[in-house]
Amino acid sequence: MLGGLTRVRAIQLNDAHIFCTLDQVAEEAQAALKMIRRAYEALGITPTRYRLSLPGPGGKYVAAPEKWQRSTALLTDVLDRSGLPYEAAEGEAAFYGPKIDVQVADGAGRESTLSTVQVDFHQPEQFDLHYIGADGAKHRPVMVHRSIIGSVERAVAHLIEQHGGAFPAWLAPTQLVILPISDTELPNAAALAQRCTRLGLRAEIAGPERGSLGARIREARLVPYQAVIGAKEAADDHVALRLRDGRRLDPQPISDVLTHISALIGANSTDLWADATS
């Protein structure tokens, strides 16, 4: 059964495979978990829980008890060092090894795995992989599977639902909407749009032909920043900025506004404004 972006005919996976030595595995797995946490912070995603997925009864798992024990110990140590609360769950491992799963939930409370970190001793052996160590001898590498956001479709579906279309400013399709009060300010609006383009900001003009100022503000309610330009702002090269969360800032020089917005977007911040006042 298909269902929106969560159940599709084909998926695009965000995945990487890191080949490393045994003494590098813990560091690589820890770095992958840290990268996932940074990505969630930038995307505004709050995980419901971290899960250590272990094998369960049945014959679907690779029969290599020593490898399972070693990889489980490594991932347990990574989770303990991270300080994150986690739960162990039997029967949720991949067929070749245990994994750290980062779980998210939708509006109906249904849980799914968005990100994973896995330690794999099995497949390097299956493909007879090796490297030449400092001692001149052959050694078997270990594979770390790193999936930061897993299925792109599932990640997008989760973002749409969690944010209701009001994405973090750096991710928003339109980051700034320019609202000239009348046709007189249209040249100023066009000049501002050009400055935004040069800075790499995604901006559009919503002119008077699209309705009253109030109607245009309501139409752009999901856009992070709304720059209102009236006669006074046009004369002073200022804009009166409205933030998506309802805050209204006093008119400010356009250069200051664009510098501030660019800095927040460049940092992948989920904040709309630093030290803003109502």
Image (spheres, rainbow, N blue to C red):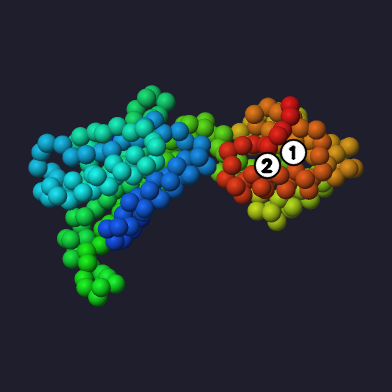
Badge 1 vs badge 2, beta-carbon distance below 8 Å: yes
User: In this view of the protein, can residue 205 be seen by the observer?
Assistant: no
Amino acid residing under circle 2: Leu
Q: Secondary structure at mark 2?
A: strand
Q: Position of residue 232 (x, y in %)?
A: 89, 37
Q: Residue furthest bottom?
A: 136
Q: Residues within 10 Å of mark 1 (few under 14, many from 20)?
A: many
Q: Nearer the viewer, residue 207 or 25?
A: 25
Disc number at residue 174?
none
Tell me the residue that label 2 is attached to. 176
Q: Position of residue 111 (x, y in %)?
A: 34, 30
Q: Quadrant of residue 149?
A: top left
Q: Position of residue 211 (x, y in %)?
A: 73, 31
Image side of residue 196 versus residue 82, left or right: right
Image side of residue 29 versus residue 163, left or right: left
Q: Position of residue 268 (x, y in %)?
A: 57, 45
Disc number at residue 227?
1
